[in-house]
């Protein structure tokens, strides 16, 4: 298995959403590891429910699988019942955190301003933020995709402290809402156009550091289509929901990215 040397390391992230108890998560990892013994040249991240994080951190150790969370609050502590902070995630062994997933924007009224605060807090506390942005069906039909990406991306980056702007940790996931969990992915060429638009916005804000930011595609990715996305110059990997829940399917995705040299 070879992975082409690029300046941006391919990244495949699983978003388990509200699935898997800690015991089920452990079973997944044990079976997955029998299938994929080692991975070099790319990052594989499991964004698990909060209750599974401690158990997974102990299990993953220093192996190639890394741990992510699906959400966090922007304050380090305080009277926010039911919330979790960045230092708590760090202590649990978390390295990546999803910010602004469309399900949080849709069901939990997460605003662009909240994503800005979270992005700032994640960077401040040394977590790698995976900022999720994307248009919904109506916005796409109205020809507003670029306007939505601009608003969500620049609005969130607004929260980033100047000192964090040059850091390499930032990841952007382009996730068209209409493609999430529907079985209807974006076309590879459309995702590529969106990714290069995102890169151009990053250049305006971050300058040269934009070249270091990894951009993922997310939305109904499966073994049959993954390399159509990861094969595009500005797409550095994928954020995967449904197809990450079964260890053997997720293993197929990892192998597909590896055997295509990281890019299709
Ligand atoms: C997601 O929820 O981030 C996602 C990409 O889901 P799915 O792969 O199921 O479309």
Image: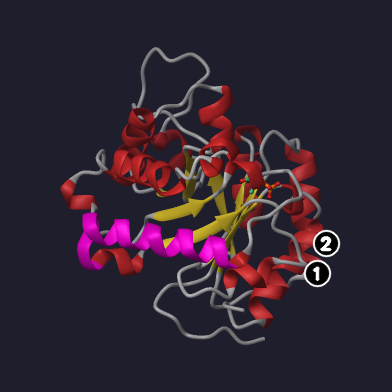
- The segment highlighted magenta reads 189-208
Give yes or no for residue 142 being in the magenta stretch: no
Residue identified by numbered label 2:
248
Q: Is residue 166 visible?
A: no
Q: Residue at x 26, y 62 (%)?
A: 203
What's the distance in space between the residues labelled 2 and 1, CA to CA? 7 Å
Q: Is 190 on the left or on the right of 34, as rendered?
A: left
Q: Establish if 56 lies above or below 226.
A: above
Q: Establish if 74 lies above or below 187.
A: above
Q: Position of residue 161 (x, y in %)?
A: 20, 44
Q: Is there a contact, CB below 8 Å, between mark 2 and mark 1?
A: yes
The residue tagged with tag 2: helix, strand or loop?
helix
Q: Position of residue 258 (x, y in %)?
A: 65, 78
Residue identified by numbered label 1:
35
Q: Is 189 on the left or on the right of 252, as rendered?
A: left
Q: Nearer the viewer, residue 221 or 261?
A: 221
């Amino acid at each position: 298995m070879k992975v082409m040397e690029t300046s941006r390391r391919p990244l495949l992230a699983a978003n388990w959403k509200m699935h898997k108890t800690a015991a089920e998560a452990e079973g997944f990892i044990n079976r997955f590891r029998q299938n994929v013994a080692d991975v070099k040249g790319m990052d594989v991240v499991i964004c698990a429910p909060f209750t599974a994080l401690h158990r997974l951190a102990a299990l993953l150790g220093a192996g190639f699988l890394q741990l992510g969370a699906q959400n966090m609050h922007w304050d380090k502590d305080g009277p926010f019942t039911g919330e979790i902070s960045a230092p708590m995630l760090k202590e649990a062994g978390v390295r990546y955190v999803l910010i602004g997933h469309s399900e949080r924007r849709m069901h939990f009224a997460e605003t662009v301003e909240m994503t800005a605060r979270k992005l700032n807090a994640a960077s401040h506390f040394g977590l790698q933020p995976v900022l999720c942005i994307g248009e919904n069906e109506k916005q796409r039909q109205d020809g507003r995709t670029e306007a939505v990406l601009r608003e969500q991306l620049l609005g969130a980056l607004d929260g980033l402290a100047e000192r964090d702007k040059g850091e390499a940790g930032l990841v952007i996931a382009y996730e068209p809402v209409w493609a999430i969990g529907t079985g209807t992915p974006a076309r590879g060429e459309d995702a590529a156009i969106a990714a290069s638009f995102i890169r151009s916005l990053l250049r305006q804000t971050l300058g040269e550091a934009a070249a270091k930011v990894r951009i993922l595609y997310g939305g109904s990715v499966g073994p049959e289509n993954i390399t159509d996305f990861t094969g595009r110059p500005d797409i550095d990997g994928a954020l995967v929901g449904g197809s990450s829940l079964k260890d053997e399917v997720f293993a197929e995705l990892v192998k597909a990215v590896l055997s295509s040299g990281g890019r299709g």
